[in-house]
Each structure stands twice: as C-alpha cells, then as structure tokens.
Image (tube, helix red, strand yellow):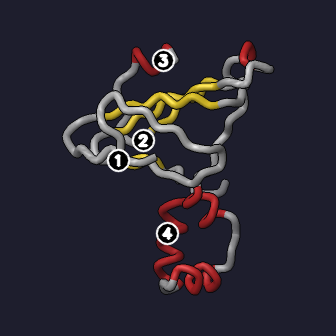
Amino acid sequence: MRAVLGSPFPTSFNVTEAGAEEFPALIGQSVSLAVLQYPAGTTNPLPTPILALRSFFSSSMGLVHFQYDADTGKLAVAISAFGSANAGFVSIPVTLFGMGIDDDILAKSFKIDVATVESLKAALTPPRN
C-alpha cells in the first residue's frame, strides 16, 4: 500500500491488493484489502453503485456489480475490505469474452453480430504469448 501513496495516479483503472499472497500475515485472518484508483470518467472492469464522497457500500460475496467514476474532472479512490485473506475477483467481461465461448453463441446470447463479438474480445482479452 505504501507504493500507492508515493506514486503518480495511474492513467487507467488500477487495483492494488493486500491479501495473503502479498502480505502473508493475513493468512488465517479472514481479511484482505484493495485500493482501487479511478482516473476521471473510468470504470472498474469488474462486474457498486455510483457513490458520493465518503460513502459506504456493502455487497454480498459473488454479487455482480460495477464501479464507475462519473466525474470526468476528478480522480476517485476506493478502499475495499473483504472477509477473506484471499478474496479474489472475477472480471465478468474479461472472463466471458476470454473463456473460449464460440462467437456465434455469444452473438446470439447478446443479440449482436459476430463482428461486434470479435471487437469486444479484442478489446477485453489480453494477447496470448
């Protein structure tokens, strides 16, 4: 977390995790944290409502949600606390379009064309080495 405080604000959405892997003292403690940094107007590609300054939001484990900095002129920072030393997360868009589901099936499911599916896949999935 010290690196977050001393570094320039990122140019794209960024998550810095403090879980058991990064901080072994958390093993068995049922807690972990994450600092989420949102440059102006960006979204968390994870699947929380838009919050006002100093707001609090609680969600159930596994609940699909999103986070968004609606202010295009100001940076936003959120601190997330989890009830697990290894909370983990799943990015719905990246997982959905990166898990090898046939393009035709995705197109039919979302009522879009295959070209749009291919465009989404290209934008959401990291290149394979």
Residue with the most extreme left position: 73
Residue at x 68% of width, y 35% of height: 87
Secondary structure under tag 4 reads helix
Secondary structure under tag 3 reads helix
- Mark 1, other Cα within 10 Å: few <14 / some 14–19 / many ≥20: some
Secondary structure under tag 2 reads loop
* Sequence-first disc among 3 and 2: 3
* Sequence-first disc among 3 and 1: 3
* Sequence-first disc among 2 and 4: 2
- What is the CA distance from the residue labelled 2 to the residue labelled 1? 7 Å
Question: Which amino acid does the dot numbered 1 rest on?
Answer: Thr
Residue at x 53% of width, y 79% of height: 110
Question: Which amino acid does the dot numbered 4 rest on?
Answer: Leu
Residue at x 73% of width, y 24% of height: 30
- Marks 3 and 4 in Cβ contact (< 8 Å): no
- Marks 2 and 1 in Cβ contact (< 8 Å): yes
- Marks 3 and 2 in Cβ contact (< 8 Å): no
Residue at x 41% of width, y 16% of height: 5
Q: Position of residue 86 (x, y in %)?
A: 72, 32
- What is the CA distance from the residue labelled 1 to the residue labelled 4? 17 Å
Q: Is residue 62 above or below residue 82?
A: below
Q: Position of residue 58 (x, y in %)?
A: 52, 38
- What is the CA distance from the residue labelled 3 to the residue labelled 2? 16 Å
Classify residue 26 by image quadrant.
Answer: top right
- Mark 2, other Cα within 10 Å: few <14 / some 14–19 / many ≥20: many
The residue at which mark 4 appears reads as: 120
- What is the CA distance from the residue labelled 3 to the residue labelled 1? 21 Å
- What is the CA distance from the residue labelled 2 to the residue labelled 4? 18 Å
The residue at which mark 3 appears reads as: 3
The residue at which mark 2 appears reads as: 13
The residue at which mark 1 appears reads as: 42
